[in-house]
């Protein structure tokens, strides 16, 4: 009996011990979660973009990142793919999902197109956002999913969302470097910095396109397929809107502006001043910077876009911390939301837009648009002859339209506020000699009959031909004299009535 009691007593003690352990671990866990949540959700005035304080939200992020997985709370590549496909299904009326290629490790580079007519060619401008160029800068890929979902939910409710969906073809590439994200490193799977892998105007290297990284080639082919008007890539590590040129001719750190420096400063300022606090930066005046003045780089994507693809691209550094806690992502979305929307909307709210036609048959012409004083050419589309020229608002610009085989035309526009629609109708450059030759070639007559008739006139019958000409001339002279007499008689009977011929 005593042995049974002691056994029961031992079981009760063991059960009580396990219960206390379980209770203690539960309390510890809840306290840890509360402490972590309190640390990860600071005041909105204490975000990662405050350059005067720490360059991140976490007070001691260096220690936290040693014990916490950086990617915790971020979408994996599979999660990202699912989110993109889900947007395509949920918003199929205003979206299209497609891939521009694959990464080194074979992951598709998925794109979300948002438009009222996705996949159709129109006269509307196209804009692209690219995120995750560097694998260890993942905020952009998350923000682009936020953007796509917001436009999907609000395109019939919010005027700005409606404007974008109905007037712009917006393309979102959330991750250009999915392999780098998986590896948690800057470069791709081949350890190549993709923002140093494009052809450069100052340093000639890697000219063989086939030797470039597959992600780089995918971007280059993408811009051959779609004529983008403007673009922006989302990076991390600073808080500033960066614009060309990224490098300089002598490799020195200095301000080195491109021909459209005013337009790029205007675009950068739209993003900076729409941001929660980018424009109040103490490091960058107005929250914008010329790339070469900040630090020169070569083989960058934004310079290549402007030079080779006619696309005005910005490099946007959207958070001082490259890889902030996932809990900060909704805050970063709120800080960047209006900047992203206003930058896209600026394509149709400013600048000069129009089409080029032929006066002969009215067909669209794939001509060129230049602006006096700016050494840069914007090309019109082949299908509709449409063009979209980004310009900073100012008093006036002289716009010139040209097309080989046609006379150029120019006119002056004022861009004080709002966009300008300007169509050009160009006249063909055809000489008199050329038109005569063209008429002969279009004649349905038989060339051999013509030659036989000429030989008949200038051969043995030349004398007969001369007599016929003399007789016809004599008859015309008699007819002319009789007509003059008749007209004189009628004038005397009609009085002072006058006839004017124009």
Image (cartoon, helix red, strand yellow):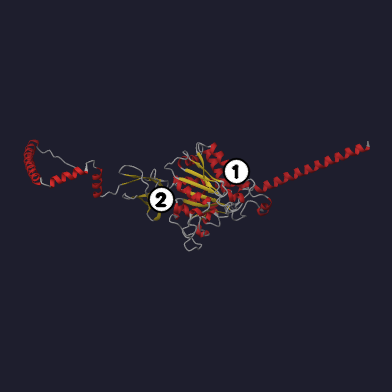
Q: Which residue is mark 2?
A: 378
Q: Quadrant of residue 488?
A: top left
Task: Decide which of tag 1 and tag 2 comes sooner along the chain.
Answer: 1
Viewer-closest of 82 and 427: 82
Which x, y percent locates residue 210? 50, 53
Which x, y percent locates residue 170? 49, 44
Viewer-closest of 124 and 225: 225
Tell me the quadrant of the picture where the C terminus can be found: top left
Residue 46 visible to an observer of this rendering: no
Residue 31 visible to an observer of this rendering: yes
Disc 2 secondary structure class = strand
Number of disc labels: 2
Which x, y percent locates residue 346? 46, 46
Residue 495, labelled with which disc? none
Q: Is residue 41 left or right of residue 289?
A: right
The residues tagged by marks 1 and 2 sit, at their Cα atoms, a distance apart of: 39 Å
Viewer-closest of 169 and 194: 194
Q: Is residue 406 left or right of residue 274?
A: left
Q: Quadrant of residue 62?
A: bottom right
Which x, y percent locates residue 486? 7, 37
Residue lying farthest to the right in this orientation: 1
Tell me the quadrant of the picture where the N terminus can be found: top right
Number of the front mark, 1 or 2: 1
Q: Is residue 213 left or right of residue 38?
A: left
Q: Residues within 10 Å of mark 1 (few under 14, many from 20)?
A: few
Disc 1 secondary structure class = helix
The correct choice, above or below, for 250 with respect to 93 in the image is: below
Q: Residues within 10 Å of mark 2 (few under 14, many from 20)?
A: some
Q: Which residue is mark 1?
A: 78
């Amino acid at each position: 009996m005593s042995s049974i009691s002691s056994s029961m007593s031992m079981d009760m003690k063991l059960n009580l011990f396990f219960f206390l352990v379980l209770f203690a671990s539960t309390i510890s866990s809840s306290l840890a979660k509360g402490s972590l949540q309190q640390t990860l959700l600071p005041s909105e005035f204490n975000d990662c973009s405050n350059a005067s304080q720490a360059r991140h939200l976490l007070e001691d992020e260096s220690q936290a990142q040693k014990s916490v997985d950086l990617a915790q709370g971020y979408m994996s590549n599979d999660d990202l793919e699912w989110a993109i496909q889900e947007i395509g299904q949920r918003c199929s009326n205003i979206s299209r999902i497609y891939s521009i290629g694959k990464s080194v490790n074979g992951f598709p580079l998925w794109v979300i197109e948002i438009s009222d007519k996705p996949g159709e060619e129109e006269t509307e401008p196209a804009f692209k956002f690219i995120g995750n160029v560097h694998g260890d800068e993942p905020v952009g890929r998350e923000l682009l999913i936020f953007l796509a979902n917001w436009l999907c939910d609000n395109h019939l409710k919010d005027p700005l969302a409606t404007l974008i969906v109905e007037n712009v073809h917006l393309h979102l590439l959330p991750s250009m470097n999915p392999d780098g994200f998986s590896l948690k490193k800057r470069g791709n799977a081949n350890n190549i910095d993709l923002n140093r892998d494009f052809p450069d105007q100052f340093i000639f290297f890697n000219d063989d396109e086939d030797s470039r990284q597959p992600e780089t080639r995918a971007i280059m082919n993408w811009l051959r397929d779609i004529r983008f008007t403007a673009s922006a890539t989302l990076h991390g590590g600073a808080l500033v809107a960066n614009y060309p040129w990224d490098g300089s001719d002598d490799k020195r750190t200095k301000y080195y502006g491109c021909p459209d420096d005013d337009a790029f400063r205007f675009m950068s300022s739209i993003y900076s001043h729409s941001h929660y606090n980018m424009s109040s930066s103490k490091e960058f005046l107005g929250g914008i910077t010329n790339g070469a003045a900040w630090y020169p780089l070569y083989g960058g994507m934004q310079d290549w876009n402007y030079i080779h693809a006619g696309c005005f691209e910005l490099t946007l550094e959207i958070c001082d911390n490259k890889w902030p806690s996932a809990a900060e992502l909704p805050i970063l979305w709120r800080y960047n939301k209006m900047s992203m929307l206003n930058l896209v909307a600026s394509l149709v709210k400013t600048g000069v837009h129009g089409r080029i036609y032929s006066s002969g048959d009215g067909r669209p012409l794939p001509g060129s648009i230049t602006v006096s004083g700016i050494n840069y050419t914007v090309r019109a589309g082949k299908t509709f002859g449409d063009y979209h020229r980004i310009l900073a608002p100012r008093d006036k610009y002289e716009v010139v339209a040209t097309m080989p085989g046609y006379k150029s035309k120019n006119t002056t526009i004022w861009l004080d506020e709002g966009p300008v629609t300007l169509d050009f109708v160009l006249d063909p450059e055809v000489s008199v000699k050329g038109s005569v030759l063209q008429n002969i070639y279009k004649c349905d007559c038989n060339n051999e009959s013509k030659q036989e008739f000429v030989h008949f006139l200038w051969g043995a019958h030349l004398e007969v031909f001369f007599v016929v000409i003399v007789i016809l001339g004599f008859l015309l002279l008699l007819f002319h004299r009789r007509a003059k007499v008749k007209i004189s008689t009628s004038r005397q009977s009609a009085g002072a009535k006058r006839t004017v011929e124009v």
